Each structure stands twice: as C-alpha cells, then as structure tokens.
Image (cartoon, coloured by chain):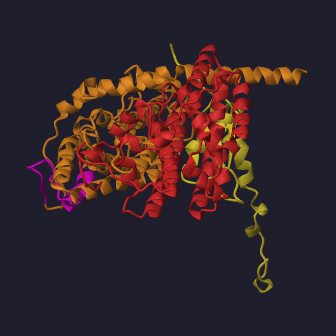
Chain colours: A yellow, B orange, C red
Amino acid sequence: MATPNTPLWEVFIRSRNGLAHKHVGSLHASDTTMALQAARDLYTRRGEGLSIWVVPSSAITASDPSEKGMMFEPAESKIYRHPTFYEVPDEVGHM
Amino acid sequence: MYTQALNTSDADDRPVEDATRAAAFQARIDAEERIEPNDWMPAAYRKTLTRQISQHAHSEIVGMLPEGNWITRAPSLRRKAALLAKVQDECGHGLYLYAAAETLGASREELVDLMLAGKAKYSSIFNYPTLTWADIGTIGWLVDGAAIMNQIPLCRCSYGPYARAMIRVCKEESFHQRQGFEIMVTLARGSEEQKAMAQDALNRWWWPVLMMFGPPDQASQHGDTSTRWKIKRFSNDELRQKFVDATVPQAQYLGLTIPDPGMKQNEAGNWEYSAIDWDEFKQVLAGNGPCNRDRLAARRKAHDEGAWVREAAEAYAEKRRHRQTAQAAE
Amino acid sequence: MAIASITVSETPLVLYTLRRADDALILGHRLSEWCGHAPMLEEDMALANMGLDLLGQARELYSYAARVEGKGNDEDKFAYLRDVRQYRNLLLLEQPNGDFARTMVRQFFYSAFADLYWRAMMKSADATLAAIAAKSEKESAYHLRHSSEWIVRLGDGTEQSHARAQTAIDHLWAFTGEMFEVDASERALIDAGVAVAPASLRPQWLKTVAGVVGEATLALPKSDWMQQGGREGRHSEHLGHLLSELQSMPRTFPGAVW
C-alpha cells in the first residue's frame, strides 16, 4: 500500500529585523503547529531566523507562466514611472 | 553529502510534444535562464530531474546510516556533537532535495516508497561499512569532498528549485569536509595505532570514493541530454580528475599513502590513477555491496515502525478540523 | 576495560553540577540514538536538535564541575572515564528509547521539570550556574513545547497511539519522583541560594503535566510509589550498556587524543 500523503507547507523566514519574510523551502507536517515547529527545526538550525510563517502549499495561487506576456510585459513600457525618465538640471542638485 | 553522478537521462523519444515549445525551452536553457516549476518543460526533462533529485535525496537519507553508526561511540563530547549535527544536516539536505523534487509533481511519499521497494537508487558509497572511527574522518574528508566537487556545479543547474537547494546544501556542507579532515589530522598526529587506523580507512574508501563520480565518460550513455539541458556541467571523468588532483596533496600532508601504487603525476600536473574496478561498482549498484541489505532494512524499519506515529498525527489533525468546523457552525 | 576510571572529589558543588551534567548527557545520548531512525524526517531533525541542546548543556556543566573540582579532570574524563556507579543521572533519563511514545513521554516528564528548574536556577547565587541556566531554560522550554504537542497528538490520535502513550506514562511515572528529591549535600546548597529546592517546583510541574495529559485524553497513574537511586549511582541495568557503548573508544585506547 502506498504511504498516505502528509500535507505540504511553504516556509517563509524573516532573517533580521526590518527585512521581509522570504520563501526558504517547504516541508511536510500534519497540522499548523507541527509545521511551525518543523520549520524551526529544519530551516533555522544556524540562527537564520527571527520569525517564521508557514502556509499550506495548497493555499497559494500562482500566476500562469504562459500568461507572462499579458501579465508583466505591459508594465515594461511605462518608463515614465521611473525617476531616471525625468531630467533635472545639474545645478539643482540631488532631488 | 552526495551521490555519484546519477545522471542517466531519458532520451526525448516521445512524439515531439510541441516542436516550437521545445525549441523555446532549449533557447531559454541556452540563455542560462532558470526553469521554474510551473514553466513548460519537456516530459523527459521533468522525468530526468525527478529521478536525479530524488535519488540525490535518498542518498542523503541513506547516507545518515553509516555515519550514524558512530554517533553513540564518538570518542569525545566535542566529536559527538559535531557528528550528530553533521548527520542531522544530511537529513536536512534530504528534506531540501525532496522538496525540490516535489515541485516537479511527484510526492515525497511516492518517491520514498520507490526507494524502500528497492526501485530507486541511492549513491553506492553508502553501501560500505564504517568499521572504525577513522572511517568517520575519511567519509568527511573524501566522501564529502567528492560530494562538494559534484554539488558546486549543480548550484548552477538549469532547474531553479534544484539549484537553490544545492546552494543551501553547499553552504551548510562547508563544515562537513573540514570536520572530517580535522579528524584525519588528529589521527595522523596520534599513536602508531591511530595512524594505522587512518591508513586502513583510506585503503578501504579510496576506490569506492572514485566510483562516486559515476562510470567513465565513454560508457555513460545519456550524458549528452543532461549536458544539453544544463543539469550536468562537467563530465564524470573531469570531476573525478579534479577530485584526485585536490586530494593527493592532502593525503601527502597527512602522511598517508593512496592505495594506488601505479599512480603518477603527468607533465600537466594531473595525477593519473590506475584502472577502477567497475565490476565492483556494478555489483554494489545491483544490490550486492557489503551493506545494501542492511541499509534498506534500516530505512524500512524506521518507516514501518513510524507508521503509527504518522497516522496518529493525521488522525489528530482530522479531529481538530472537525472540532473547528463544529465550533464555527455553532 | 583497558583503562581505569577516574576518581572524583565530590564536594557538594561538584556533585551537584555532575548530577545535572549527567542528566543532560544521558538524555542527549538517548536522543542521539534515534538519529536516522525517526518516524518521519522532520522529527529526525527535531530529536537531533534536542539532543544537541542537551549535549551542549552537559559539556558546559562538566567543564564547570572540572573547574570547581580543580583536579585536572575535564568534560571528557567525566563522561568517558566514570563507571556506572559513579554516574549521577536520574533513572528516568537512562530508560531505553522504546517506541516513539516512550521517548516522548520521557522527554515530556523531564522537560516539564527542566523548564521550571532552569528558570528558577537563573537566580542562583552561583554566577556560572545562573548563566548556564539562562541558556538551558530557553532550550528546555522548547523541548517542553515540542514534547507536549506530541503527547496530545499521540493521546488523542488513533486507538493504537493512545494505548502506546498510556503504556509509556504508566511505565515511566515511577521514575518522576526522583526529580524532586534532595539529600543533605544538596540541602546545604539550597540554603546557600546556589541550588533551588526541587520540591517547590512540584505543584507547578504536576499542573503542567496533568494539563497536557488531560488534553491528550490520557490519565496519570494513581500509584505514588517512586523509584530512586540514580543520584547515588544505583542505576537500572540499562545504564551499563549505554556507557559501554558511549565509552568504548577511550576505554579501548588509553590516553589517545581523537
């Protein structure tokens, strides 16, 4: 008989104060409490973290890579959203 | 720790799924782009990677056993803590790798079941026994040394999750080889008995370690596809030579003799080693190494005896979900 | 055995420190026996982490005992060159791992105590013990958290896990009394503010233990008969086997450095 699947969780860790949580990997656990403890035991053995989030992998909705063009390319042409688009005379100094 | 080049690829022999997509995929690879889990990929690429990453993961987990054999007998508390931490790291590396394999669509449970059923391979090096404490030093020095040679190029592998797992593994493994070499240095500076112990361990491990890099290039059938897909960036023989060249001076430093009387340095500075006994390699891979049966039996025992624990955790989670639903309904 | 055991000048403070060091080493050793064999890989990580915490505590305590004793002993001599009769750990901690329920109940009973104990010891008049306590308290608090979660899951999991957890509790209960015992040498240290009176920790320990055991739908035994002897070196038969494995290298190769 095949082994039944234990739910998969995605782990996010904030490594230092002031930084955002960053995805570090995944693990298996039966429930939220055990997922959090497993994340601590697996992903912070070398003092990598100050805060952990665990999220059921099934709760993540991802964009479809085949729609990359529609999703992301339209933003690329909006160069006027970037400060370097605008000219400020040198004598004005830093702005 | 790693694994010989478990790099047989599946030839892309299915009816061409979508020639345009396949071409676009190869163009991305050629441009050194990383492939991510939801991206389109040829079925053979997925299958090859699932197999390679899961076998790499199995190797980490089975690899806990030979060194684990000495945790309870480590000769000092400092060594004991370092060894326990190291073997635990191997477990962590197995977990990172299973997670990477799962992004390709297989579940860890399926992959583990294949290994327990004897249908998936793991690195043959772990089918050799650890007889003395010097074996622990030698494994760290040589087996981890060979692993690092293999794993560093994998940090640039085309598949994003595998490459990221390898970066983490390499970062953590930097202490493993040093830990092993320190044990060897201590033995080399010790009594005659300790020196003999170190030499004996080197004698037993040297050839199996060279086999870790996989069959010689001319015998490896599918290297091409893996290379084209940038899963593999160096050939087995290239990595093996690099390893030998790095190791010989270390053995000299330790005052140990590499058990290859025919070995000599060529004009280019490379150390030429004698012929490797590939029959032994094939036998071990086929299940006839000194410890194959023990290793699988130990993993099966842990799996079977742990079943009731995993079931309890699932049953509790299920009850908790019911209670929460009932509460919410009130 | 090729090499003789050391002798230890067991002044009250040396003895007191060695007892706690032995607790940590023996339990840490037991946990390290699981490495590579746990019910799931995530739990392999957890057991090794707890084992490493305990090994770390043992090393600091042995080193301190060696400094206090001042007879040239060190952490490894204490660990590797004392015989079973010289070991001072609690009987509870040398009990074999058994199944996962047995291991977790042992951990839970001890961690529920150690958490309170180390927190109280942070106020020790002995600055070194207070510093070790500050580190150990955080570790023990996590061990308690982790083992408690397992007790609840095993107790309130399946019929089988419930039965195994209850058997483990029934089996190990008689070893819990020893945690709260003191002898004359310890009483003097308690009076001096160096040690804490463990009996004062028992009501809170019982409350924690009974709370988790209740949540787990398990029951504590009615019996109040308690085994003793570990603190004086009267051990179960299990410790000798553990030590013969633990000490095999230094005993086989006298004086060698590894």
In the foreground, B309 or A86: B309
The residue shown at (16%, 36%) is: B277
The residue shown at (13%, 58%) is: B266
The residue shown at (36%, 33%) is: C241
Task: Please determine whether, in this image, residue B94 is positioned above or below residue B154.
Answer: above
Inspect this view and state whether residue A92 appears: yes
- Can you give x and y, in whole percent of width and height, for residue B118 in the image? 37, 21
Task: Please determine whether, in this image, residue B49 is positioned above or below residue C98.
Answer: below
Compared across the picture, whether B241 is left or right of B233 comes to: left
Q: Residue furthest bottom?
A: A91
Q: Across the whole image, how many numbered discs are drawn on residues?
A: 0
Within the image, what quadrant is residue C66 found in?
A: bottom left
In the foreground, C3 or A27: C3
Q: Is residue B309 magenta?
A: no
Q: Residue furthest front?
A: C184
Q: Quadrant of the C terminus of chain C?
A: bottom left
In the foreground, C164 or A39: C164
Inspect this view and state whether residue A14 appears: no
In the foreground, B36 or B275: B275
The residue shown at (14%, 53%) is: B257
Q: Quadrant of the N terminus of chain C?
A: top left
The magenta segment is B241-266
- Can you give x and y, in whole percent of width and height, for residue B258 in the image? 16, 51
Task: Please determine whether, in this image, residue B146 is positioned above or below residue B319.
Answer: below
Q: Residue furthest right?
A: B330
